[in-house]
Image: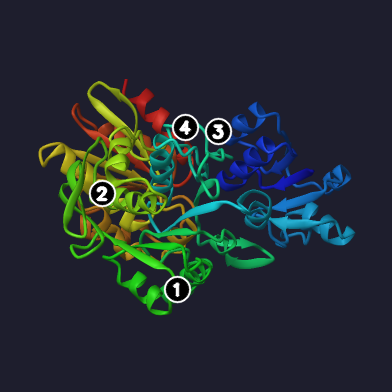
Amino acid sequence: MHIHILGICGTFMGGLAALAREAGHRVTGCDAGVYPPMSDQLRQLGIELIEGYGADQIALQPDMYVVGNVVSRKRLPDGSPKFPLMEAILDTGAPYTSGPQWLAEHVLHGRHVLAVAGTHGKTTTTSMLAWVLECAGLQPGFLVGGVPLDFGVSARLGAWVDGQARPLFVIEADEYDTAFFDKRSKFVHYRPRTAVLNNLEFDHADIFDDLAAIERQFHHLVRTVPGTGRVVVNGLEESLARVLGQGCWSEVASFGATVSDFCAEGDPGDFDVLHRGRKVAHLSWSLTGVHNQLNALAAIAAADHVGVSAEQACEALSRFQNVKRRMELRGTVNGVAVYDDFAHHPTAIRTTLDGLRRKLGEEARILAVFEPRSNTMKLGTMKSQLPWSLESADLIFCHTAGLDWDAAEALAPLGVGPGRRAQVAGDIDTLLAQVKAAAQPGDHIVCMSNGGFGGIHAKLLAALK
């Protein structure tokens, strides 16, 4: 069939496009400000990209329009629609569906789906699990909201291996809503047989009123897991205990807590894996932070459900290369290392910086450069947590463009201003100047954002020469 994807350059929709193309469908798509790296990846696949959401695209007459959740019925100040193509689809009665629904019906149906949900670590854990299954010879399909360095692509269909009841598919399971016409979380479409509940905190303040509302969506996911399935749950999270308390009809495998089915003993970079108190494997690897130790346990418990031993999983993870933009070293200039990281929620910021501090020791200086860019952070819902999240950094630099709240006031407990621990800047050039003036040989600069951050990584490396 011919599908035309609205919002094709997002990580999820771009991955869906790649899967559809691999399955033999004709794929076209549109987006505003068609941008790399997804635009480059899609063009390499022979997918035609159209700039903008013009109503003239109705003339393409595809078999199905697949609508990303970036699309809405929003009107511009002059009263015209922000997405004219969507209005044309509705006016003409052309067929349309959401990305998650199309994926469920055309890719996931008939497969053993392993879905990884959680506020943090979804992309990393999904990549770990896919890599573990790949190293075990199971050739899984996957769709990741990032690019795993071990695979070099964000999505693939995978293969049906002899002896499997169903081909395997690993998917990052997002709790964000599906589309403007389907306000359920994306993950309720995936019907997993193995569901990982990695952690659960309040996030997405633009669509959820409180933590209880997100817990309710996670329970909707639990309801879709069959009795022969497995729910892998972080035993350290009270919020997830409340989710399971609403009802669970599947096998539960816990991880993290001392009394869990799977737990760790030792430093996050070098630890034993215990199954119900008995050592079953050891993992020594390059990743840092307790959060990645927990991500590994989640992947090990999920892989165990499809017959991969903890020992096999740890051998694979010892060679795991992580994901682009997860503490990715972008370069070192004059003794200053510059990293790119996707952290944007306060807890993710803290665990990222804590992991680096543990690795470097107390003597090294860490410079945290971040922008509160997510919808939740822009609303200021979690601004009071920022000083706590940045405690492991020696110096802090905050990009404040687009904020309706006072970042300097929020960071005041750390000390704000020239020569103080924290500084703020309303534009990238000022931010660059602040960081350059402060940087010294031996420093580690961590740039944290869920967006492109104005290309600050390359600009910093150039400025430091």
Residue drawn at point x = 25 percent, y = 40 percent: 367
x and y, in percent, of residue 40 in the image: 61, 29
Q: Position of residue 133 (x, y in %)?
A: 42, 41
Q: CA distance from mark 1 to mark 2?
A: 28 Å
Q: Secondary structure at mark 3?
A: loop
Q: Are marks 3 and 4 in contact (CB under 8 Å)?
A: no
Q: CA distance from mark 3 to mark 1?
A: 41 Å
First in sequence: mark 3 vs mark 1: 3
Tell me the amino acid under the disc marked 3. Pro
Question: Within 10 Å of the Cα at label 1, are there few (<14), some (14-19), or many (20+) other Cα atoms?
Answer: some
Q: Which mark is residue 151?
A: 4
Cα–Cα span, label 4 and label 1: 34 Å
Give me the residue at 87% from left, 46% from top. Answer: 61
Lateral position of residue 83 relative to residue 157, left or right: right
Q: Do residues under tags 4 and 2 come within 8 Å of each other at their CB atoms?
A: no
User: With 200 as the anchor, is 6 left or right in this view?
Assistant: right
Q: Earlier in the sequence, mark 3 or mark 4?
A: 3
Residue at numbered disc 3: 37
Q: Which residue is mark 2?
A: 293
Distance of label 2 from label 3 (alpha carbons):
29 Å
